[in-house]
Image (cartoon, grey):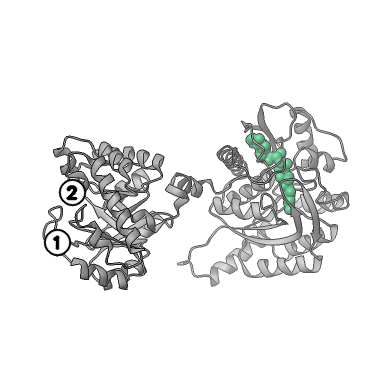
C-alpha cells in the first residue's frame, strides 16, 4: 500500500537516523484486549515476541473474556483510538500494521485516516467478527467500511470460515472448494492476497487454509492438533504473518512460517489446562518455555538445594571402579540435593555423554545438575547451570551466555569476591576450602572464621566446601549464619567404597546439625 510515500518516509528517516543503532522490525497491532490473554492484543504481543519482532498496541476495545466466552465488551471511544494511533505512528517506525477487532465503523474510519497520514510498508487485516465461542466482537455495521475501504489497502486479509461468509453476504462455507471460491471473491474486493482459514472446516483431518494471490491458489495443510486450546489461533496467525512481513519476508513464505508456528505451538501446548471452559489458550513462548520446562522446578532456584551438594571427581570414581552415572545415582539416592560435575581430566566427548546421562537421572529426581567450568558442555547438554572459580570465565559472561533461568555459583574466599559474584548475577557462592583437601592443589584454606566472614558479607546464599565430611560437617553448620545453606563434598562421598551409605550418613549429620542451629 502507498509504497512510494512509505519509501519516502524511510529515506527521510535514514537521513536522520544513526545506523550504528539496530533497527528492530516493528508490528503495530490495532485490536481488542482479551482479559483471558488467549486472543486479541495479548496473543499479538506474545506471537510477535516469539517471532523476535517488536509489537506496539492500539487497543480498540476491552473485553471481559475467559475460556467460557465473552462476558462483556467495552469499546474505546474512537477519538481515543485515534490518539493512540497518532502516538505510535508519529513517533515509532512501524513496518507493518495488523488489525484485529475493529468494533465500530467509526474506528475503521479513524484507522483509515491514520494510515493515510502515516503509511506503512504492509497491512494485515484479520477481519475479526465473532469469537470462536460465538460471541459478536464486531457487528455487520463495519462490513461496508471493511469491504470498500480497508480491504483495498490490505496486503493480506485472513478471514476464517464465518468471517469469509460474512464478507460475502452470508453464504456458508463447508468445503475446500467453497473456500477457494470465497478466496477469489474476496480478492475481488481489492486485497493483494487472501488467506481463508479452515480451522473450523467440518470433518477435515488436516487444518487446511487456502491462500490466493490473484493468480494462483495454494492449499496449505498442517496436521490438525487434537486439543481444546485453540483460542486465539487466528490472532496469532495474523500477528505471525505481520511479524514475518516486518522482517522483510515475501507474503506466501510469511504465511507458511506463521502456519507452522501455530501448529507447533498448538502441539506443544495441547495438554495444558488453563480455565474450565470449552476453549483454552495455548502457549506462544514455546522456545523459552522449552527451556523452563526442561529445568528442575521451572527454573526457580531454591537456596535450600545447597543442603547436601555432591561434586564429582572422575579420578576418584574411576579408582573405585564406577561410572559417573552410578556415582550420581547413588548420591541422589542417599539424599544429595544438588549435583555438580567437576571432571577436569575427561575428554570433551565423554564428558558431554556423561553429562547428558547424569542430567536425565537428576531431572527424574528433581535435583539440579551443574557443570564445573565448562560452558561448552553446560550449553550442549542444557544443564541447569554452572559453577565457576575465580580464574574461570567471569560469572557475568556466563550469565549472558546461559540466560536468566540457569543457576550460577562462584567460588569465593573473600567478601570482595562475594560482592562481585552478587553484582555479576550469580545465584550462590561456594566458600572454601574450609579445611585442607587433596582434591585441589595449592588451595589456601579460609577456616571457619574465614567462612563466617564471607557468609556475613555475602548477599547470596553460601555453601561451604573443602575437606568437609561426616566428622566435621556439624562444626561447619554450627557457625550459625543464616545464609550458610549447606556443605559441598567430593571425597567424603566419592572417595569411599559405598557412595549411598556415605551420603546417607552425611545427610543425617546435616539434618541433626541444622535442627540444632535452628
Ligand atoms: N486444531 C488445529 N490444529 C492445527 N491447526 C489449526 C487448528 N485449529 C486451527 N488451526 C490453524 O490455525 C489458524 C487459525 O485458523 P482458525 O481457527 O480457522 O481461525 P480463527 O481463530 O480466526 O477462527 C489456521 O492456520 C488454521 O489452519
Ligand atoms: C479481543 C479479541 N479479539 C479477537 C478474538 C478472536 O479470537 P478467537 O477467534 O480465537 O476466539 C477474541 N476472541 N477476542
Ligand atoms: Mg479459531
Kindly tell me whether residue 397 is visible in this rendering.
Answer: no
Q: Residues within 10 Å of mark 2 (few under 14, many from 20)?
A: many
Q: Is mark 2 within 8 Å of ligand 1?
A: no
Residues 282 and 13: in front is 282
Is residue 13 toward the left or the right of residue 111 in the image? Answer: left
Q: Residues within 10 Å of mark 1 (few under 14, many from 20)?
A: some
Q: Quadrant of the N terminus?
A: bottom right
Residues 423 and 246: in front is 423
Say what secondary structure mark 2 lies in: helix
Quarter-of-image position of residue 211: top right
Is residue 502 toward the left or the right of residue 438 in the image? Answer: right
Quarter-of-image position of residue 63: bottom right
Residue depth check, mark 2 versus mark 1: number of the one nearer the observer: 2
Ligand number 1: quarter of image: top right
Say what secondary structure mark 1 lies in: loop
Q: Which mark is residue 443?
A: 1
Per the image, the residue denoted by label 2 is 491
Q: Residue at x 26, y 47 (%)?
A: 505
- The mark nearer the N terminus, 2 or 1, is 1
Q: Is residue 509 above or below residue 181?
A: below
Quarter-of-image position of residue 294: top left
Amino acid at each position: 500500500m502507498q509504497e512510494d510515500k512509505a519509501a519516502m518516509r524511510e529515506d527521510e528517516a535514514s537521513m536522520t537516523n544513526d545506523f550504528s543503532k539496530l533497527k528492530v522490525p516493528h508490528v503495530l497491532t490495532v485490536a481488542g484486549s482479551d482479559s483471558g490473554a488467549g486472543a486479541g492484543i495479548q496473543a499479538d504481543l506474545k506471537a510477535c515476541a516469539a517471532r523476535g519482532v517488536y509489537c506496539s498496541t492500539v487497543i480498540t476495545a476491552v473485553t471481559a473474556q475467559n475460556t467460557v466466552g465473552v462476558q462483556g465488551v467495552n469499546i474505546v471511544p474512537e477519538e481515543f483510538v485515534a490518539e493512540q494511533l497518532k502516538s505510535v505512528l508519529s513517533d515509532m517506525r512501524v513496518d507493518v500494521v495488523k488489525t484485529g477487532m475493529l468494533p465500530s465503523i467509526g474506528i475503521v474510519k479513524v484507522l483509515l485516516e491514520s494510515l493515510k497520514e502515516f503509511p506503512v510498508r504492509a497491512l494485515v487485516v484479520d477481519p475479526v467478527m465473532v469469537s470462536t465461542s460465538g460471541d459478536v466482537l464486531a457487528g455487520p455495521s463495519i462490513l461496508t467500511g471493511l469491504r470498500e475501504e480497508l480491504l483495498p489497502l490490505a496486503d493480506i486479509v485472513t478471514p476464517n470460515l464465518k468471517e469469509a461468509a460474512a464478507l460475502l453476504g452470508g453464504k456458508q462455507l463447508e468445503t475446500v472448494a467453497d473456500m477457494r471460491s470465497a478466496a477469489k471473491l474476496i480478492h475481488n474486493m481489492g486485497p493483494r492476497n487472501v488467506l481463508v482459514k479452515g480451522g473450523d472446516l467440518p470433518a477435515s483431518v488436516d487444518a487446511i487454509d487456502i491462500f490466493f494471490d490473484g493468480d494462483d491458489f495454494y492449499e496449505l495443510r498442517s496436521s490438525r492438533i487434537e486439543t481444546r486450546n485453540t483460542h486465539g489461533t487466528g490472532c496469532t496467525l495474523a500477528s505471525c504473518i505481520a511479524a514475518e512481513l516486518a522482517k522483510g519476508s515475501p507474503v506466501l513464505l510469511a504465511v507458511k512460517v506463521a502456519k507452522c508456528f501455530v501448529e507447533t505451538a498448538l502441539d506443544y501446548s495441547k495438554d495444558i489446562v488453563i480455565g474450565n471452559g470449552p476453549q483454552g489458550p495455548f502457549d506462544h513462548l514455546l522456545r523459552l518455555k522449552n527451556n523452563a520446562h526442561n529445568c528442575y522446578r521451572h527454573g526457580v532456584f531454591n537456596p535450600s538445594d545447597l543442603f547436601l551438594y555432591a561434586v564429582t571427581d572422575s579420578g576418584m570414581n574411576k579408582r573405585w571402579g564406577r561410572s559417573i552415572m552410578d556415582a550420581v545415582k547413588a548420591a541422589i539416592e542417599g539424599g544429595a540435593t544438588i549435583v555438580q560435575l567437576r571432571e577436569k581430566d575427561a575428554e570433551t566427548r565423554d564428558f558431554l555423554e556423561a553429562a547428558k546421562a547424569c542430567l536425565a537421572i537428576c531431572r527424574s529426581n528433581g535435583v539440579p545438575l551443574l557443570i564445573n567450568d565448562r560452558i561448552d558442555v553446560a550449553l550442549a547438554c542444557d544443564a541447569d547451570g554452572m559453577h565457576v572459580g575465580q580464574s574461570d570465565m567471569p560469572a557475568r559472561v556466563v550469565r549472558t551466555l546461559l540466560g536468566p533461568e540457569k543457576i550460577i555459583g562462584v567460588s569465593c574466599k573473600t567478601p570482595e569476591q562475594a560482592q562481585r559474584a552478587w553484582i555479576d548475577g550469580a545465584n550462590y557462592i561456594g566458600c572454601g576450602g574450609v579445611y585442607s583437601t587433596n582434591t585441589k592443589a595449592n588451595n589456601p584454606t579460609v577456616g571457619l572464621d574465614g567462612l563466617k566472614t564471607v557468609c556475613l558479607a555475602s548477599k547470596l546464599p553460601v555453601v561451604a566446601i573443602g575437606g568437609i565430611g561426616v566428622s566435621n560437617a556439624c562444626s561447619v553448620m554450627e557457625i550459625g549464619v543464616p545464609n550458610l545453606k549447606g556443605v559441598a563434598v567430593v571425597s567424603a562421598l566419592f572417595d569411599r567404597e559405598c557412595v549411598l551409605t556415605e551420603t546417607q550418613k552425611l545427610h543425617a549429620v546435616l539434618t541433626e546439625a541444622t535442627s540444632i542451629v535452628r
